[in-house]
Image: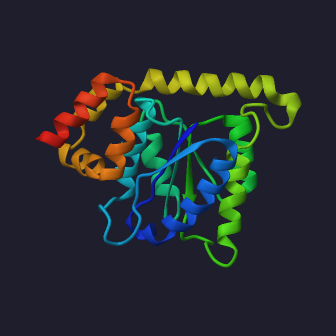
């Protein structure tokens, strides 16, 4: 599995903590982690608005399989990511959230509140979140006897989102191009995207934005 980590400007100082714990957990499971920022206050500037664009591009192009995102409360990143087709982001405060989201909703992104409650022992909580999010088989249901209905409802929600959203690329083209350009300008994002992108139309679109 390929996993992208991203957070916005107000939580840049938390990036190193999240990255270390994510790489430790993912490495033991054979997954690859791409840190797309922000890493510190001097890094390429991102808001939670940009995270939604970045995460949706990485997931819809199949450049990555999962996105770990976050902002101060986690709510902005959650809303921004869920604004796009092909993205099913859950809100995650503790390891139980991560486990239940993986088993019941089986989405492809998490939003973490990196400021709210991020105090003593925060690195342990983050590590346990990643362990519950990525260990074992996803979509098994909880409790197990409810698996059938939970899998069915998760599939229904996917179809509803597809039905109510416009074509993803058309949607990107309708967004303020400056927002998109800022989102895709970061060097680490570009390295992850272009190295792994499996959708030529989206790759051409991003190159066109960068060249504009």
Q: Residue at x 35, y 44 (%)?
A: 191
On screen, residue 40 above or below 83: below
On screen, residue 182 above or below 60: below
Q: Position of residue 94 (x, y in %)?
A: 70, 59
User: In terms of image quadrants, where is residue 159?
Assistant: top right
Q: Position of residue 101 (x, y in %)?
A: 68, 42
Depth check, front residue: 137 or 46: 137
User: In terms of image quadrants, where is residue 141?
Assistant: top right
Q: Is residue 72 visible?
A: no
Image quarter where the N terminus lies is top right
Q: Position of residue 25 (x, y in %)?
A: 67, 52
170 on left or right of 11: left
Q: Position of residue 57 (x, y in %)?
A: 37, 36
194 on left or right of 151: left
Depth check, front residue: 16 or 126: 16
Q: Residue at x 33, y 36 (%)?
A: 194
Q: Residue at x 42, y 47 (%)?
A: 80
Q: Residue at x 25, y 36 (%)?
A: 206
On screen, residue 75 above or below 88: below
């Amino acid at each position: 599995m390929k996993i992208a980590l991203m957070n916005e400007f107000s939580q840049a100082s938390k990036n190193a903590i999240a990255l270390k714990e994510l790489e430790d957990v993912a490495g033991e499971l054979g997954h690859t982690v791409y840190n797309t920022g922000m890493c510190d206050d001097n890094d390429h500037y991102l808001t939670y608005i940009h995270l939604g664009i970045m995460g949706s591009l990485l997931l819809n192009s199949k450049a990555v399989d999962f996105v770990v995102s976050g902002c101060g409360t986690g709510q902005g990143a959650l809303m921004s990511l869920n604004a796009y087709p092909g993205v099913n982001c859950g809100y995650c405060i503790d390891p139980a959230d991560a486990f239940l989201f993986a088993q019941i909703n089986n989405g492809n992104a998490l939003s973490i509140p990196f400021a709210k409650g991020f105090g003593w022992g925060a690195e342990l909580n983050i590590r346990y979140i990643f362990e519950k999010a990525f260990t074992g088989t996803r979509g098994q249901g909880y409790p197990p006897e409810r698996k059938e209905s939970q899998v069915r409802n998760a599939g229904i929600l996917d179809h509803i989102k597809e039905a109510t959203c416009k074509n993803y690329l058309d949607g990107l083209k309708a967004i303020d191009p400056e927002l998109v350009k800022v989102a895709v300008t970061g060097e680490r994002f570009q390295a992850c995207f272009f190295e792994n992108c499996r959708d030529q139309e989206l790759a051409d679109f991003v190159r066109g934005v960068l060249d504009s």
